[in-house]
Amino acid sequence: MPYEPPTHTVERSLRATTGAKVIAGVDEVGRGAWAGPVTVCAAVTGLRRPPVGLTDSKLLTVKRRTDLAVVLEKWVTAYALGHATPEEIDELGMTASLRLAAGRALGGLPVRPDAVILDGKHDYLGAPWQVRTVIKGDRSCVAVAAASVIAKVHRDKMMAELGVDHADFGFAANAGYPSPVHKAALEERGPTPYHRLSWAYLDALPRWQHLKKARVWVDGSVPEIEGQLNFDF
């Protein structure tokens, strides 16, 4: 399906209205996975013409996405990755883990951004960052689209490497997300050290429910973890 290429419209608006000079596009991958970290990329692109074919990573084939990431890593002014581990996700929940991973990514840039364009409608970053949220920013904003592709390719590679010793789970193909192969391996072998143990998929695994972790607020309530998927996929 044809798609409109991303532009610098939001970045130009931020420059004009806030005086920001260094603007980072931020996107995440791994929010809905059962295993592995949540990964955030922060990318600074300036106002240069982007590489041909740049768009949301989910709209690209694996080959095109991988090839484009190689080009982007040389083309962007700067980029950095941040991760939150499965253990941190279990302890903190997804929103706080996204904030942690994004802070690590932004902190890894050589220059602190004056403003951030964040994909989606929810600002999980907050102060002290000056944030502009953009729904479908990974399709419409150059810097966010670049961050989307780089984050996806790096996390997919990481999951493939983690899956070498857990071949039955198919991490190289599913990147820790739900799939029939992943589900079958969980039922047979239980979670790996890379699984998120506070998530709802364990409710459907009687043999392994004793491994489930629960986060509890000070008032004793058990919060729902945002973005997780159960076995009904």
Image: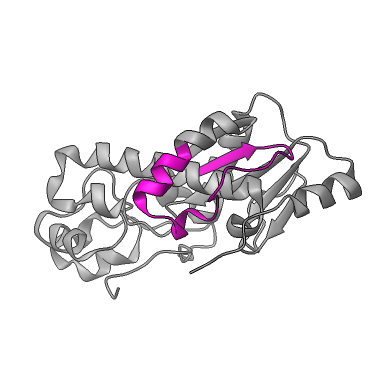
Q: Magenta span covers which residues?
A: 40-69
Q: What residue appears at the point 84 percent right and 52 percent down from the top-left corner?
A: 13
- Estimate the x, y position of residue 123 in percent, counting from the top left: 67, 56
The residue at the far left in this view is 188
Left or right, 50 with reference to 22: left
* Residue 41 belongs to magenta span: yes
Please identify the quarter of the rendering in which residue 100 is found: top right
Left or right, 133 with reference to 80: right
- Estimate the x, y position of residue 1 in percent, counting from the top left: 48, 69
* Residue 198 belongs to magenta span: no
Judge by depth and name the residue closer to the eye, 121 or 156: 156
Q: What residue appears at the point 24 percent right and 47 percent down from the top-left corner?
A: 172
- Estimate the x, y position of residue 159 in percent, counting from the top left: 30, 43
Residue 39 appears in the figure? no
Judge by depth and name the residue closer to the eye, 130 or 60: 60
The residue at the far top in this view is 110
Residue 189 appears in the figure? yes
Quadrant location, the C terminus: bottom left
The residue at the far bottom in this view is 232
